[in-house]
Image (cartoon, coloured by chain):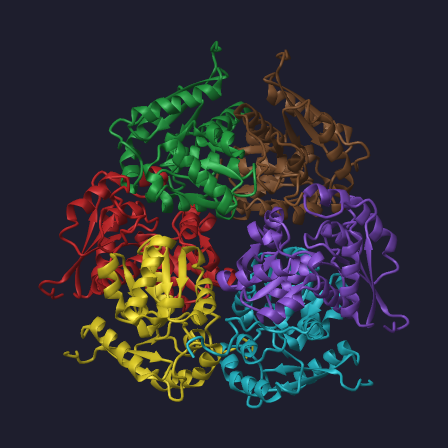
Chain colours: A red, B yellow, C cyan, D purple, E brown, F green
């Protein structure tokens, strides 16, 4: 794929250390960027294998802050490539350039595509954290359900598991849009769209087009107060 | 500006009949598109001069539906270029292609850029309607204030009026992001950014990059139920 | 039924074109009015057969506005006789006389009669629209459920279908009040009351007694701002 | 005023012992009833002079319950004629006939007449109680403000005080409808309408036309659960 | 158990007249107090056997107010030992010393121990009242479910019934904390903790340690306005 | 005061490195504990001087987790002694013993003492973070205002500054309870109580009596899901 010289550059920060997931995100990102901008997915050194607990999020923190400080000058925009949007507030404070989490991006875009969305996750453990995230973004009333595989579904391959959950969301919970609630599921949205006929989205693409748009629009995080790294008292 | 052959085409529907506003929107849109996609702003025949009352919205309805039906095949995405998002639900029902209102687009993007936003409008009359719109999108708790010029401000030129309102929003209401609440103000965001140092956004650019992103992502409005033009009973 | 001379006159606007439904509403209205006021149910010319989609609502709009403009002088109060309350804001803007939708009327009265209500509709398609309507009136937390017939229920006659849904609402969802969510169901409330022993209400009666009360009280829609047909800038 | 034989009879229970207020309510009620139904305002024996504190409400309780038990057979509907709606849940439990509080009635009707209402009270002490009442009825988001006279306003006669507060509500808080938040202000609504040109309502009329409507519609409080005086375990 | 001289003294007011429940509460309270403070549970004379309906609450009112007035000087803090928190606002108005309801205490403490709580009650009748109570304390979004025994569960002994409900709350509703919604269940929390491995709490202990803390901290109910027994106009 | 052997031990973790603040917290804590339990306030090594920005919170994270892991066996309960409750979710995941933040503790206790509270902070920068914290705990509707010193107030000594803000909260915003929104203000609550006559609270005492109570009640954080450090998939 030809790369324009002087192109916009966006980095995706994967806070876990799973090389397969990083590769998957990179692939999704390139497919979406189509050469309009350069895109790079990087892994945090010493990160946990997966981000599932508060402890996992905690451990990824120092590396994420170090990475964005190191790369801030070289990139035009930043994406946190984990659906929990870990440390997103801290990253928005560090740089004034556009930063988006794949959680917030997919949740906000989903609300524009249908009445209510359902979020498909990989593990029951994440249900309360996802619920809190949705509430943080004031989207509780736009949620049909948050679903994780249980019982016999756990024996199915990932793709079938997601399809089964998405079907349940649509038929029983009234979901009109499906959100893949984990960067590791990236790519399955096409399967869901084809099989079930509803919009299914992954946060990687959503975050990329929002950051791309913000970069072109010349705008980033407000430093008025909440995300200002300098204390008023200084 | 060079136009790529086979490019994506997005239409902006301006529900009023003010030629100056249509020209202004077209200019903003082209500046944002930068040739990545074709963009066209069209006016509704027999529309009111401005959209301010429920009656104005009402009168623009038949023309808007007729326009999207007529142009549905020729365009890849649709933007309703009035901040009230008039008839947006109806348009999302008519086509399965991406449709965004400049109201919903700017409101959702604003929440990603700072703690709370203020919306600057042109007329006190619009305050309750804008408040209702914000509530429709579940964003009441992200709003610092909704402001319209009153008293001596009414004698100022539009640009100074908007600057004064934006300054008030930041200093008195804690706004961290400014939204221009009328397509006719399009372009003033740069002035506010430069003078006041906070992100200021206009819905035209926001709606364009969201629709552009959705087109590239191959996704549009869910037809699961709410926006399905066919009744279940048929 | 004897009609008092000089009596109050209330019109019910049925935005669809189904003559059977118009007759049914007229009958319900006369039974409630008992000669205290004159009541007339009128159909919109060129309206869709039923109001189920945003397109149906859209198509009924011009005729509804035309009718209220034409009859504004001759009537004391107005009722929109479709549970979606289509174009209610526009009608409240056109006249300063009392206007009520059967949706808003039945929803508000229901909250005074029990802990939570359930809304019985005729078609799954309407669920998201009814949910939005309830949220528009800030009554989400007073709702036990919104139910439409599915599966085997679809084969039952309308009365049995409604009874089955109402029973489900009471026994499974904790509903204490039943609202008939469609003017076409008008009259079935007596059957539900008799069979299930809970208050069941139809919006036609509720809207009539609220409009009757407002007329006697000499009060109508505020023209302070939201429903003022004149822009401030004029 | 001629009284129809066999007419509907509605009682207004004034939980305080102020004879002037009882007379005022009786007058307002008769003016609204216009002979369509009989109306009687009664005072609770041993009630506090005014209802302002939780202690006042508490003291009125036994007498209110005794009165409704005594008169339940002889009346068709009941109104609690104090804006705090004291003991309303208890009264709805005691009888299955229609009961309305002037608080709930005026608040719900106000939402149908304009964008937001302001509530005018007589005393700062009542502000938190009125705020709680509004929240109980899920109407916080429909409230522009709750106002009590302070400072120099306290020296004005009641009518001017209310006018001043109503003017402030409209001009500064965006109120489109004014609610008189005390039965003792009954009658001032006409002055406010005439002077300020917005709908102003008193709960006595609103509660009367709702109860009148419910009686004619043959419906009262649900005994499904919340207002059932019999325990399930009995 | 040795009692320190000059110790803090807390009274628990049981608004019902069931001697077994009073004894049970006294036992729980002493076990928690462990001699750090004196504790006494008293029954209201002429109270209903159990508090389940609005009428029951109503009948307990005069005795509760009389008791707190009589004992106000002799005790340092007060607990309303019924999960509905009957007349709590009135009692907070009567004294400036610390007062807590077992409902509010257990609900607030539960939110600190896990994601969402479920409330276990004894009777379906109480479901709407408990729901209202939770909403009064702004805790609706922290609630997983409110459960009462139905069907075959009604035949089980109380302990097994509660265990079954708690298990259902955890497994089906996502509850992470169990609240015993009736003072009469006091003591069963240990069984639930042991069997199901989640925190289970009873309001008696929670209210006691909050009141104990407030007494030591030298603080009670604000008399700024809401709970001030004196009217501003006096 | 003699220290009982085998006493309960509670640690307060001060996430900043200001020795004066640590000493102040220790003093407040001992004054409250009165020998009923041992209490120790510790500072995080390499912590920022004050916790004001997301970056400050971020930097304190590793040290806080290390400290609680190191001391988990030796203490019975834990308090996070910074009003932002930094990393509270992570700490609740690490240990099953009781953990409270001074933010959540003071906010929840305040709701039991009056109608609405105001939070007094030290710096305008913290306003959005405090607002977010309050919303996290579902207490937005219980908040009268969040105030920080500005303009001439900045020149006053800390005590007078707080008094001035508290007075403003009570007189202008209707606050009935004052919360000191920073551990560094600990001790000023007595001054506010004495001067202004309303309850004023500091989170240190509130968190201590809640943790003390939970330890005595034998209960801590639920490990059902949200705060379980082990993933379901393991």
Q: Residue at point 58% right, 74% down? A: C85
Residue D86 on image: x %, y %: 71, 50
Image quadrant occupied by the C terminus of chain B:
bottom right
Give whichever of E129, D133 is nearer the camera.
D133
Residue B158 on image: x %, y %: 30, 71
The answer to whether residue C181 is visible is no
Residue F136 on image: x %, y %: 44, 45
The answer to whether residue C208 is visible is yes
Give whichever of E105, B184 is nearer the camera.
B184
Q: Is F211 placed left or right of D82 in the picture? A: left
Q: Is residue D76 above or below residue E155?
A: below
Give whichever of F25, B100 is nearer the camera.
F25
Q: Residue at point 60% right, 60% down? A: C145
Q: Is residue E13 above or below residue A61?
A: above
Q: Is residue D7 above or below residue E220?
A: below
Q: Is residue D168 above or below residue E201?
A: below
Quadrant in which residue D153 is drawn: bottom right
Residue D34 on image: x %, y %: 80, 72
Quadrant in which residue D209 is drawn: bottom right
Q: Is D143 placed left or right of D3 in the picture? A: left
Image quadrant occupied by the N terminus of chain B:
bottom left
Total labels drawn: 0
Q: Is A33 placed left or right of D66 in the picture? A: left
> Residue extending furthest left?
A5
Give whichever of E219, C102 is nearer the camera.
E219
């Amino acid at each position: 794929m030809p790369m324009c010289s002087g192109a916009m550059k966006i980095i995706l920060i994967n806070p876990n250390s799973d090389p397969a997931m990083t590769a998957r995100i990179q692939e999704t990102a390139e497919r979406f960027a189509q050469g309009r901008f350069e895109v790079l997915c990087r892994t945090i050194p010493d990160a946990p294998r997966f981000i599932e607990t508060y402890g996992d999020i905690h451990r990824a923190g120092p590396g994420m802050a170090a990475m964005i400080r190191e790369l801030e000058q070289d990139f035009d925009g930043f994406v946190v490539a984990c659906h929990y949007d870990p440390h997103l507030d801290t990253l928005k404070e560090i740089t004034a350039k556009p930063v988006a989490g794949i959680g917030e991006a997919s949740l906000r875009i989903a609300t524009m595509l249908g009445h209510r969305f359902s979020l498909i996750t990989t593990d029951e453990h994440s249900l309360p954290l996802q619920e809190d995230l949705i509430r943080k973004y004031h989207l509780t009333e736009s949620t049909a359900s948050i679903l994780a595989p249980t019982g016999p579904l756990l024996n199915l391959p990932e793709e079938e598991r997601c399809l089964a959950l998405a079907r349940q969301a649509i038929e029983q919970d009234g979901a009109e849009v499906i959100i893949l609630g984990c960067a590791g599921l990236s790519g399955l949205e096409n399967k869901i769209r084809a099989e079930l006929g509803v919009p299914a989205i992954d946060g990687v693409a959503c975050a990329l087009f929002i950051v791309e748009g913000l970069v072109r629009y010349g705008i980033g995080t407000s430093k008025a107060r909440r995300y200002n790294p300098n204390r008023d008292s200084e």
